[in-house]
Image (tube, coloured by chain):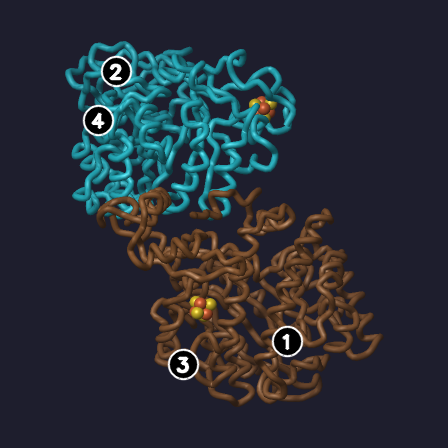
């Protein structure tokens, strides 16, 4: 597992500070760049506008180009952007208006507005980076978010964003602003759990959520946005997957991909594991039907977080490796598995005893 | 609640097929049709329509937007020019019975590209915006001018990022140099194999020794050029057709799984010699038998086959945006995605347009490679390129899946304003789509197995073939 925080000794600051760590003097140095002065064991000292910034990390190599968020009074900094990783996500708020049974990041009630810092961080990201934006629910702060995106999208034409949103806060008035950002720059990841509104609403813990969601998706469709629909497979929506496939491929066919996802055992997903985990290694049938319907209709489908050996052979081409590097692990029976390269393995916090019953031997 | 407009058609079993403008469909009964027409829909009808996205509450809701999106995504968007058909020579070393117009004898002078034509073609290619190109060499027999093929390929490889070349050859005489060309990784072969040895001999090679030579070459090509590099088309004369089973077995024996059966396309006088309508009827019957035979074959054999055009039509029924075939698009915008450059440097919007012009029916060329494309002529052809507002198609249940083939209408009837149902194009497509739906709604497991495969899926789920009482 890769650490998302590093210990720092920062100069005295009053406001949260965004810093990019550089091993060498760059051609153009920004005010946010800290350049390595010397390195001794795990103590790295950087020059930040004449002040000393000390970072405790095993080596300067694997943090070169990283962008940190240093909060006054906190002994460790967030690695907002890890330059060597493809999985960087900015958590813009921890507040949310839904309470999903599988939430991996259970919401909190307070909010600190760090959009300016996030914009600065994004502007310092390596070339062609794809930056995730998540929460909580990012669109609770819609105007701040759109403002930040507008700024970065214009200043850095090489960057793209992947925004995870519950789709509850979009209205027809947002169509021009979203269209302006450009369909090729933003991929909107939006969860949908069932076509039966009552089932969807109970999974997300909010009544009326499905109706709001269809409104939000209509806005994204009209804005010509790129959308990734996301469905976590649960015992609660297991028998709804075929009708959901029908719904998506006939009314939401504008979406670029439909992600059918296995449960992540963290947060509420961990707490509700026993009543929510659907063992698709034992019974794949409704996922298979969902894929068949989608394929016939030309709707592209991806299976996220499915260990390859849990997926029947004829469907394995739909299952790319998706678990982020910093939270991925393999189990003992994966040693010597010929599919390991192509397989995303397991979440770090997955407990095999309560998980997939039929694995190994692809 | 507003119900979207439906078009409908009776199927053989008395059930009625309904489609909307977005190509979404279901089957129902005569009684439902009456309730729909007389605006007497019952609660259970309205519930079915709502659940399946066939009705909406207001124009801001998802059902309406989804319907609009389904409609829009059925329309073909012209793309940049990235596919060129080249005819470097009209000379040929065979004289196939139905090919009198698109060839001349091997020794006839004056039917090859001149040096200037080659220069103009390369100049034209260099002006294209695309970074990827597909070049198809036709003839005549293009291998008679291997030098020109090599020159075009070298130029393309130096000009474009990704190149693909197809040589349409009769595989009759293949020199060692030609074999080397065909073996190149970016070159593939398209040939003709008329379903049975007898048919091939009768229609093409005329002597036993020439027939044997062809089969030897085909065997060499399929076994040496690599997986998927050789494709073949059978041309079928429906009046003397080989049995579907024998065609399938012949193709399977060469490891060719995708069979694109086509009726003999007589041109000019030959077409007038016999009753065209009767031939269309015979073809439709044969086509249906062929599909049934393929289904039986796939149930029993491990090496599965498909009929290429049927698969295309099936996929057009099930999904939008399946526009990969130049003969079936709506609108079928000519002169945009691909062009044909003839042996004399004249440019045509399609290969059929080249034939029509050659038999002297009318001039459908749209320019010359040296002087450029006559856009006003292309635009004139494209005025009638869509079936959305055609007075016959507008009522047709198959309109969202179907297309337009103006050049075919012009070539057969010399006009484009015949009632659609009298045209060969319409009759053939009506029959193909009838067959698509007959098979889609079939409960025969053998049919379902083939259909799923042809649809690119593992099963035909009941939710794909909805029915309402
Ligand atoms: S054995 Fe491990 S590496 Fe192999 S497919 Fe299964 S989970 Fe993946
Ligand atoms: S050409 Fe015939 S089959 Fe095609 S849409 Fe028109 S009427 Fe229907």
- Element under label 3? loop
Which chain's residue wears label 4? A
Instruction: Determine the secondary structure under disc 1.
Output: loop
- Are the residues under badges 2 and 3 in a single subunit? no
Query: In the image, which is nearer the foreground, mark 2 or mark 3?
Result: 3
Identify the residue shown where x is 34% and y is 54%: B35
Q: Quadrant of residue B458?
A: top right
Camera-near label (1 vs 3) is 3
Residue B6 in which image quadrant: bottom left
Residues behind callouts 4 and 3 on a single chain: no
Residue A117 image label: 4
* Residue of label 2: A52
Mark 2 touches mark 4? (CB < 8 Å): no
Q: Is residue B366 above or below residue A355?
A: below
Residue B396 rendering spot, x and y as whole percentages: 41, 66
Residue labelled 4 has its Cβ within 8 Å of some atom of ligand 1: no
Letter of the chain that mark 3 sits on in the rendering? B
Q: Is residue A35 visible?
A: no
For the point 41% across and 60% down, the residue is B8
C-alpha span from label 1 to label 2: 84 Å
Q: Residue A96 at x, y = what percent?
A: 24, 23
* Residue A230 x/y as whole percent: 38, 33
Is B102 in front, or is A230? A230
Residue at image x 34%, y 69%? B389
User: What subunit carries mark 2?
Assistant: A
The residue located at (42%, 57%) in the rendering is B30
Q: Identify the chain drawn in brown.
A: B
Q: Is residue A210 above or below residue B104?
A: above
The quarter of the rendering in which ligand 2 is drawn is: bottom left
- Colour chain A is painted in: cyan
Report if the beta carbon of the residue with label 3 is closer than 8 angstroms to ligand 2: no
């Amino acid at each position: 597992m890769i650490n998302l925080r590093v210990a720092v000794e920062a100069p005295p600051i009053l406001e949260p500070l965004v810093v990019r760590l550089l091993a060498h003097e760059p051609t153009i140095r920004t005010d946010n760049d800290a350049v390595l002065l010397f390195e001794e064991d795990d103590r790295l000292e950087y020059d930040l506008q004449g002040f000393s910034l000390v970072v405790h990390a095993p080596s300067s190599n694997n943090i070169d180009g990283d962008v940190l968020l240093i909060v006054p009074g906190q002994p460790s900094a967030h690695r907002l952007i890890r330059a060597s990783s493809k999985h960087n996500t900015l958590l813009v708020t921890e507040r949310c208006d839904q309470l999903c049974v599988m939430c991996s990041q259970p919401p909190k009630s307070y909010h600190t507005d760090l959009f300016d810092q996030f914009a600065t961080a994004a502007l310092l990201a390596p070339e062609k980076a794809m930056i995730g934006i998540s929460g909580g629910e990012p669109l609770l702060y819609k105007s701040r978010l759109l403002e930040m995106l507008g700024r970065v999208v214009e200043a850095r034409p090489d960057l793209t964003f992947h925004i995870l949103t519950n789709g509850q806060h979009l209205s027809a008035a947002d169509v021009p602003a979203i269209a302006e950002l450009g369909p090729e720059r933003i991929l909107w990841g939006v969860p949908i759990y069932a076509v039966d509104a009552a089932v969807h609403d109970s999974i997300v813990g909010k009544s009326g959520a499905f109706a709001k969601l269809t409104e939000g998706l209509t806005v994204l469709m009209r804005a010509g946005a790129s959308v990734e629909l996301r469905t976590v497979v649960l015992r609660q929506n297991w028998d709804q997957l075929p009708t959901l496939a029908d719904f998506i491929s006939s009314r939401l066919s504008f979406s670029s991909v439909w992600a059918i996802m296995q449960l992540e055992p963290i947060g509420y997903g961990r707490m509700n594991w026993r009543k929510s985990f659907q063992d698709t290694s034992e019974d794949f049938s409704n996922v298979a039907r969902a894929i068949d319907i989608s394929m016939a209709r030309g709707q592209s489908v991806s299976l996220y977080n499915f260990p390859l050996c849990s997926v029947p052979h004829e469907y394995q081409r739909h299952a790319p490796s998706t678990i982020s590097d910093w939270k991925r692990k393999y189990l003992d029976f994966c040693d010597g598995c010929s599919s390991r390269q192509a397989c995303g393995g397991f979440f770090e916090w997955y407990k095999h005893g309560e998980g997939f019953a039929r694995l190994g031997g692809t | 609640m507003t119900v979207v407009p439906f078009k409908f058609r009776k199927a053989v079993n008395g059930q009625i097929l309904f489609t909307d403008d977005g190509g979404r469909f279901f089957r129902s009964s005569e009684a439902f049709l009456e309730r729909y027409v007389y605006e007497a829909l019952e609660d259970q009808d309205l519930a079915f329509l709502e659940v399946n996205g066939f009705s909406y509450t207001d124009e801001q809701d998802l059902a309406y937007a989804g319907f609009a999106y389904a409609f829009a995504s059925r329309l073909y968007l012209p793309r940049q020019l990235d596919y060129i058909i080249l005819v470097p020579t009209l000379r040929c070393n065979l004289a196939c019975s139905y090919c009198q117009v698109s060839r001349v004898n091997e020794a006839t002078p004056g039917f090859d590209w001149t040096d200037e034509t080659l220069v103009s073609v390369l100049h034209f290619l260099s002006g294209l915006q695309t970074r990827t190109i597909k070049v198809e060499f036709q003839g005549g027999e293009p291998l008679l001018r291997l030098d020109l093929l090599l020159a075009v390929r070298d130029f393309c490889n130096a000009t474009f990022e990704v190149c693909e070349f197809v040589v349409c050859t009769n595989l009759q005489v293949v020199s060692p140099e030609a074999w080397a060309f065909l073996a190149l990784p970016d070159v593939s072969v398209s040939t003709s194999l008329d379903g049975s040895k007898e048919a091939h001999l009768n229609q093409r090679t005329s002597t036993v020794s020439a027939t044997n030579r062809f089969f030897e070459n085909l065997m060499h090509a399929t076994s040496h050029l690599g997986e998927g590099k050789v494709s073949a088309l059978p041309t079928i004369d429906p009046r003397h057709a080989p049995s579907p089973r024998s065609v399938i077995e012949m193709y399977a024996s060469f490891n060719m799984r995708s069979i694109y059966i086509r009726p003999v396309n007589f041109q000019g006088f030959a077409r007038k010699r016999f009753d065209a309508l009767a031939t269309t009827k015979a073809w439709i019957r044969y086509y249906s038998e062929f599909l049934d035979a393929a289904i039986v074959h796939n149930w029993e054999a491990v090496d599965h086959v498909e009929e290429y055009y049927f698969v295309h039509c099936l996929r057009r029924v099930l999904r939008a945006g399946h526009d990969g075939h130049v003969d079936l698009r709506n609108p079928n915008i000519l002169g945009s995605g691909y062009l044909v450059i003839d042996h004399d440097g004249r440019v045509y919007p399609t290969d059929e347009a080249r034939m029509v012009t050659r038999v002297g029916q009318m001039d459908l060329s749209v320019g010359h490679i040296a002087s450029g494309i006559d856009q006003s002529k292309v635009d004139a052809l494209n005025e009638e390129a869509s079936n959305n507002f055609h007075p016959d198609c507008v009522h047709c249940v198959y309109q969202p899946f179907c297309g337009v083939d103006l050049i075919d209408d012009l070539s057969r009837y010399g006009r484009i304003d015949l009632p659609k149902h009298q045209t060969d194009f319409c009759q053939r497509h009506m029959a193909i789509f009838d067959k698509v739906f007959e098979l889609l709604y079939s409960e025969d497991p053998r049919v379902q197995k083939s259909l799923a495969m042809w649809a690119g899926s593992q099963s035909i789920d009941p939710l794909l073939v909805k029915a309402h009482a």
